[in-house]
Amino acid sequence: MSAVRGRTPPRRCWRRTASLAARDGIQARLIDPRERRLVPVRTLIQALAERCRPHAAALGCLEQFDQLGRLVEANGADRQRAAAGRTGLTTLVATLADRFSTEGSD
């Protein structure tokens, strides 16, 4: 990347990062805004979480904040792929549709 340190990367870099994230999810390698290079999403999340953890503690929501690690290790896409492998795609779709329709009925 040709960005000069200290300057905001060009808009096309952010579009590329969004495209990578949409395509690869948690397995993506995205632009680290400080280092100006591609790094694993998990690395970016870990670094950001370390910076945010004291704020979560101050707000009294550390228990909820600490659940971030669980989401990074097995996100929704990972859980859905595992469920499809166990029960089949038809059952997975039916289960997700049922959850979606019952979540809005509260």
Image (cartoon, grey):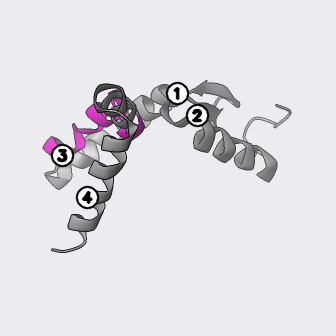
| Circle nearer the N terminus (2, 3) | 2
Tell me which amino acid carries mark 3: Gln
Instruction: Say which residue label 3 marks.
Output: 64
- Is 19 placed left or right of 106 in the picture? right
Q: Is the residue 62 above or below the residue 41 in the image? A: below
Give the residue type that dot 4 points to.
Asp
Closer to the eye: label 4 or 2: 4
Element class at badge 2: helix
Question: Which percent across, then down, holds residue 70?
Answer: 27, 32
Q: Is residue 99 above or below residue 68?
A: below
For image coordinates 59% across by 40% down, the residue present is 21
Q: Which residue is mark 2?
A: 24
- The residue singled out by tag 1 in the image is 27
How far apart in space, not on screen, are marks 4 and 3 (Cα)?
26 Å
Q: Secondary structure at mark 4?
A: helix
Give, as a single range, the part of the protein colored magenta.
63-77
Q: Which residue is mark 4?
A: 98
Percent across and percent down for residue 49 are 36, 37
Give the side of residue 37 with respect to residue 50, left or right: right
Disc 2 to disc 3, C-alpha distance:
26 Å
- Residues at circles 2 and 3 in contact by the CB criterion of under 8 Å: no
Q: Is residue 72 on the magenta stretch?
A: yes
Q: Nearer the viewer, residue 49 or 90?
A: 90
Identified at 30% across, 61% down, the residue is 100
Neighbour tally class for label 4: few under 14, some 14-19, many 20 plus, Cα within 10 Å: few
Task: Please say whether residue 36 is one of the residues in the magenta stretch.
Answer: no
Quick check: marks 2 and 1 in contact, CB under 8 Å? yes
- Majority SS type along the magenta span: helix
Relative vertical location of residue 62 with respect to residue 30 in this rendering, above or below: below
